[in-house]
Amino acid sequence: MIVCPLANFEKVYHTENGAVYQCSRKNCYWLEFQDSTTAFRVSDFFHFKKCIDRIDIFSMINDTSRTSDFEVIMPHRTERCFILSVQDILNLREILSGAKFMIELNSDVKKILRKEGVFLVGSSV
């Protein structure tokens, strides 16, 4: 459960395996994954996504040693430790990629609307 008093949460992206929410009050993102919720500063969220994207799944699958069955990730400035199987990594990548796409799409739409708004205001004078 997400705990952020007086927060205004908006769902950014979700799948059956988890979700990302944006907290407008604290300017952060919340990741729901593996029955747990983790808060990230904006820059830490994108850094975490890069870390997950850098995991070499091909090597994990082809390496027969027991140590390659899981990847342990400890994101910056959180108390969370993720222990991820190959399937967990794929699920998390889907959630994080979808969230990043939606965040970028929202930003682009706002830029276009601002430009259109400025153009309309400027043309009516």
Image: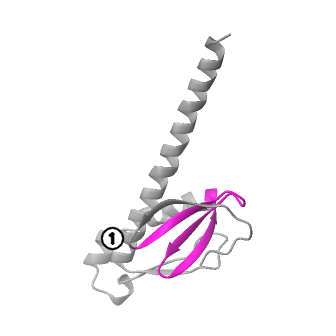
For label 1, the residue is 57
Q: Is residue 42 left or right of residue 82?
A: right
Q: Residue 111 at what x, y percent from top left? A: 57, 34
Q: Residue 74 at what x, y percent from top left? A: 57, 76
Q: Magenta stretch containing residue 24, yes or no?
A: yes
- Residue nearest the viewer, comparing 2 with 65: 2
Residue furthest top as drawn: 125
Q: Magenta stretch containing residue 35, yes or no?
A: yes
Q: Is residue 85 visible?
A: yes
Q: Quadrant of residue 23?
A: bottom right
Q: Is residue 115 above or below residue 20?
A: above
The three-letter amino acid code for the residue at tag 1 is Ile
Q: Is residue 115 above or below residue 78?
A: above
Q: Residue at x 52, y 50 (%)?
A: 103
Q: Residue at x 49, y 64 (%)?
A: 51
Q: Residue 1 at what x, y percent from top left? A: 59, 79
Numbered range of the magenta stretch: 17-43
Q: Is residue 54 visible?
A: no
Q: Is residue 41 left or right of residue 65?
A: right
Secondary structure of the residue carrying numbered label 1 = helix
Q: Residue at x 62, y 74 (%)?
A: 2
- Residue nearest the viewer, comparing 14 with 60: 14
